[in-house]
Each structure stands twice: as structure tokens, then as C-alpha cells.
Amino acid sequence: MTQNELKEAVGRAALQYVPDDCIVGVGTGSTANYFIDALGTMKGRIKGAVSSSEASVKRLMGLGIEVFDLNTIDKLPVYVDGADEINHQLQMIKGGGAALTREKIVSAVAEQFICIADESKYVTVLGKFPVPVEVIPMARSYVAREIVKLGGHPAYREGVITDNGNVILDVHGWQVTEATKLETELNQIVGVVTNGLFARRRADVLLLGTADGVKTYK
Ligand code: ABF
């Protein structure tokens, strides 16, 4: 199977976690896009969606799925999204698509986080993929210097402005063995909006696309 076929398979498999008549949280990226397309096949059974990016809003609306403002929702049973890396504790690095802040907000509200990924994303130790950090533009250099003190090597993602009007630093060189601690330390740096470690709110379920089919980890 190709990588896209694996992504498509997990996107479809995630439908089993979507209850009837609910509003579903929808992520961002190529794997999430397969989920959105699969959701289109059951759109009559859901009320609509809350989305973590403008790109996903467009795709959902293009399929005729109503998109709600998160502030109008008091219950979100499930959030389905991809990841850049996920470890065996279901902690993740996310934000390669620059949507990390909204992804973290929507996943915080959701009762269940279903991560969908192909097997290339499943790792023992997080960190080969650089950790994205969303930063208020005027704090960029200061935050970069603070990250160096934590042993990271930040690189400015040039030409990218997030949906929230901020910039991204991609931090290389970390072997993330204590993801919750590092996530908290990064959050303490003034000027950081969000970081791409999803450890305090990890996934509840991983649907992993492999050559032997979709495997489920909890
Ligand atoms: C989102 O999309 C992000 O958190 C992550 O950066 C990216 C994964 O993209 P893809 O599914 O295209 O690999 O889930």
C-alpha cells in the first residue's frame, strides 16, 4: 500500500468513533483531509464540525458540512487529527502544518482524541521531527534565545504566518524523553503562544495505518 492509501484507510477507520448527531472536532493536514472526505459520506448523521484551521473549514464546507464556532459548543465528543510523530505513550509532535494552536484548543475541549497516522509517524522517542513553537512575532528572537538555553536549535519558518497572525520556530536537536516537562517549560517562555508537544493532552486512541491493516493502540 502507498502512504496515501494508509492515510485513507485510517481516515475511514476513524468514522467508527463519530457518534450520530454530534458535532465532531476535525484536524488539519493530508491525513485529516482523508478523514474529512470520509466524513462527507456520513454527513446526514452528524450535526456538523468544529475545525482547527481555515484550510479544513474550506474543505468541510465544500462537502456541505456545517462548521461551528467552538465558542458556541459545550460538548465535543471526539476530535480526529493527524500528527507529525507519535510515541508509544500516544504523546505527539504536531504543528508541521502550522495549525498547532487551534489543534491544541480543539483537542483540549474534546472528550476523546483519535490520532490517525501512517506507520512512518510511530516512533520510540519524539524529536527527529522538529518541535514547532508558535510565537508572537515581536518575541521571536527572545524566544529563540530561551530555547537555546533549553538545548534546542530553533529555526525560523520563513514565509509562514499562522491563522492567528503569528510565526513559527521549528526546534531541532531534541530527544524528547520527558515530553510533559518540556511542553510545560516551553509554555513558560513569554511570547510563546503554543508548542507542538501534545503530552499533557495526549491521544486517547491511535489508528495506525500499516501494511497489515489498521492497528488500534489505546
Ligand atoms: C496536523 O497535520 C498537524 O498537527 C501535523 O503537523 C500534520 C500532519 O500532517 P499529515 O497528515 O499531512 O502528515 O495533524
Image: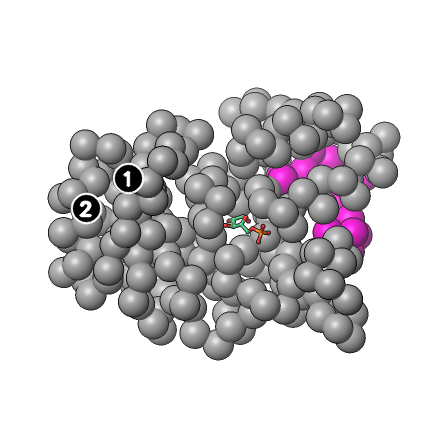
Q: Nearer the viewer, residue 185 or 3?
A: 3
| Residue 20 coordinates in the image, percent (x, y) | 81, 39
Q: Is residue 124 above or below residue 147?
A: below
Residue located 65% across and 63% down the image? 118
| 117 relative to 157 in the view: left or right | right
In terms of secondary structure, where does tag 2 sit? helix
- Residue 50: name its quadrant: top right
Residue located 71% across and 40% down the image? 36
Can residue 215 be seen by looking at this rendering? no
In terms of secondary structure, where does tag 1 sit? strand
Can residue 36 be seen by looking at this rendering? yes
| Residue 175 coordinates in the image, percent (x, y) | 34, 72
Part of the protein shown in magenta: 10-26
Residues at discs 1 and 2 in contact (Cβ within 8 Å): yes
Q: Which residue is mark 2?
A: 143
Q: Which residue is mark 1?
A: 135
| Residue 168 coordinates in the image, percent (x, y) | 33, 42
| Residue 161 coordinates in the image, percent (x, y) | 38, 32
Q: Is residue 16 magenta?
A: yes
| 59 relative to 94 in the view: left or right | right
Amino acid type, mark 1: Val
Q: Quadrant of the C terminus?
A: bottom right
| Picture colour scheme | one colour
Q: Is residue 77 above or below residue 69?
A: below
Q: Is residue 54 above or below residue 25?
A: above
Q: Earlier in the sequence, mark 1 or mark 2?
A: 1
| 50 relative to 189 in the view: left or right | right
